[in-house]
Each structure stands twice: as structure tokens, then as C-alpha cells.
Image: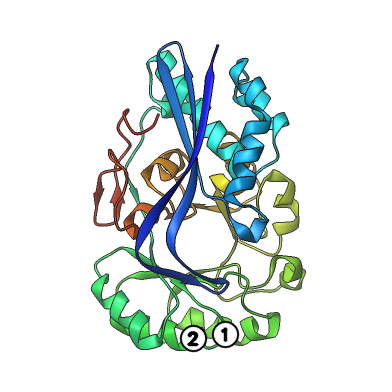
Amino acid sequence: MARLGVRSERWPLAAAFVISRGSKSEAEVVVAEVADAGHRGRGEAAPYARYGETTEGVIAQIESVRARIEAGCDRAGLQALLPAGAARNALDCALWDLAAKRAGVRAWTLAGLARLDPVKTCYTISIASADEMAEAARANAGRPMLKLKIGGADGLDAVEAVRAAAPKTRLVVDANEALGFDEFRRLAPEFARLGVLVVEQPLPAGEDAALCGYASPVPLCADESLHTRAELGACVRRYAMVNIKLDKAGGLTEALALAVEARALGFAIMAGSMVGTSLGVAPALILAQGAAVADLDGPLLLARDREPGLTVTGSLLEPPSVELWG
């Protein structure tokens, strides 16, 4: 019989992480462990208040299915037990890890991949003054891609400053729902002029119908507007790209299915993650294979990562060791 363990952990950040909705100085995550017949699978999730999640609530959700997990529920069965979100993600990734260790193969083999290639991730610059963001960009100008958080129309000054500080780096702008449609329509040509690769979630999720049919001069990516395959249809004619995160989708199982369906509809893929440790990011490297953009820099933002963690060279994330995950 399997044994389920669950716990919360706090990991200090190297610097405050600031977006339009607020700031934080630590990553609080939930780790699920499923052990069976000498093997142990682990999964990490990051509860997100924007989606009504708390650490206590996520742990309670996991505990609510303890009997089913310990009776041998597999990844397919889990999809019907819990809704999409952090709790299902922690368990789903733990079951992937456990299945790989039982089979004596790597998790990407179970996902149908012949190999797992290293992934180049964005590096996030939090909201600050334009001068402070430019300084951060200058210090990271050698990275292939920077992701800039903005909190409103005044964020254009920061984008201008960052572009001057890092003229050769590709830029992603993430508004985290902070703009109105008229504001964004005024800013979009300026973002295009500055060579912004994509703008992520400019409008609140409940207001992005205004984007339907709008010919944006810079490609748009859905984040808060997209969790699972259920929201894909509404993103058509609004977005060119979708940000798929394991915590939103409720695990690697749904995330991979979502990516297949999204590509079939013509969307480019951003493989994203919440701020957490290498354990939370490792499964997303499978999702990131072939993605247009990878935003998996959570471990790079920590004061310290778990051991063993992912091997990181600059912005390049190597495949996880078997001791870490999968």
C-alpha cells in the first residue's frame, strides 16, 4: 500500500519579487510525497492567492484524497479527484516521479520523449523604478531573454530604460492584468517599437473579450485567462500565445494535453511556473520542450535552492538528476 506525505516549506528569495498585485520575499510551497515498494515520488506546488489558494487549503485538498492515493490511484484517476490547481499539481508530479522510478526509466520517456534537452529560461525583473529596473537589466544583459513586470501605463518608462540597458536581449513584458484596453492600445505600438517579443496578460482575465479581433502590433500571451483546456476556446482571436503552468493546469498530465490542443489551434506555447524550487520546475522542463518561450526562473530567484537542485548555467537549465525528480 502506498504512503502519502505532505508538508509546506518556505524558501527565502534573493530579492523581493514585485508584480502589479503586490510583493513577496519568500516562496511558500507544498510538497507531496508518495512512497510505495521502496520507491518515492515527489511533487512541489505553489499555492497562489490570485486563484483563491492558501497553503492550508492546498494541504487540506491533498489530505481529502489520502485514502484514494494510498489505495493506488494513478495519474489518470487523479484528474477526476481534484480540480485543476496547486493540490492536484503536487500529487500529479509526485505520481509521475513515482511511476518513473518504479519503471526504471526517466519521466520524459513516460511522456513519449526520446530525450530531454536543456532549456533557456527568461529571467524576471520585478517592478521598481525605471532606473532600478535598468540597473537590474544591465547586470543581466548577457541573458538571452528578460521578462519585465509592469504595473500600469507608467511601465513604458521602465521598458524604455531596460531596452537601453540591454539592447541585444529579447524582452517579454508581463502586466499581470494591470492595464485597461485603452491604455494597452496606446502602449502596444511603443512596445513594438522597442522590440518587445510578447506582452503577457495585459488586461484583467474578466475583461479580455475587448481583445477579440484586435490586431495587436505585438503578440499577446494569455496567463491568468488560461488554466486548462476548458479556457482555450475563449483565447482564440484574443491571444497568439498561451502560458501553461503546472500549478494552473493541475499537473503535468493536463499541461501536456493542453499544449497539444493549444498547438492544434495555432497557439505558440510559453512554459511557465510560479516562484518555487527546482523540484517544482523540473517537471515543467518536459512541457518546455519545443516551447517558444520558457519562463522557469523560479530557482534563480531564490536565496538558496534545495539540494540537489537543477544545474543552472546562466539561464540554461539542465535536465534534472534522478535524485531530484523523474
User: Which of the marked residues, 2 or 1, is nearer the chain's N terminus?
Assistant: 2
Residue located at (61% from left, 87% from top): 186
Q: Residue 276: image x %, image y %?
A: 43, 51
* SS assignment at label 2: helix
Query: Which residue in the structure is indicated by mark 1?
Result: 187
**On residue 273, which mark appears?**
none
Q: Is residue 152 above or below residue 88?
A: below
Q: Is residue 234 left or right of residue 290?
A: right
Query: Which residue in the structure is indicated by mark 2?
Result: 156
* SS assignment at label 1: helix
Residue located at (32% from left, 84% from top): 164
235 or 26, nearer to the observer: 26
Q: Is residue 204 left or right of residue 127?
A: right
Name the amino acid type tagged 1: Leu
Do the residues under discs 2 and 1 have CB atoms within 8 angstroms?
Answer: yes
Residue located at (59% from left, 40% from top): 59
Q: Is residue 38 above or below residue 313?
A: above
Task: Check disc 1: other Cα within 10 Å, few if <14, some if 14-19, many if 20+.
Answer: some
Measure how far apart labels 2 and 1 are at the Cα level: 7 Å
Q: Residue 300: image x %, image y %?
A: 32, 56
Residue located at (24% from left, 73% from top): 139
For the C terminus, give its image quadrant: top left
For the N terminus, give its image quadrant: top right
Name the amino acid type tagged 2: Leu
Q: Is residue 205 above or below residue 294?
A: below
Identify the image quadrant of residue 278.
top left
80 or 175, nearer to the observer: 80
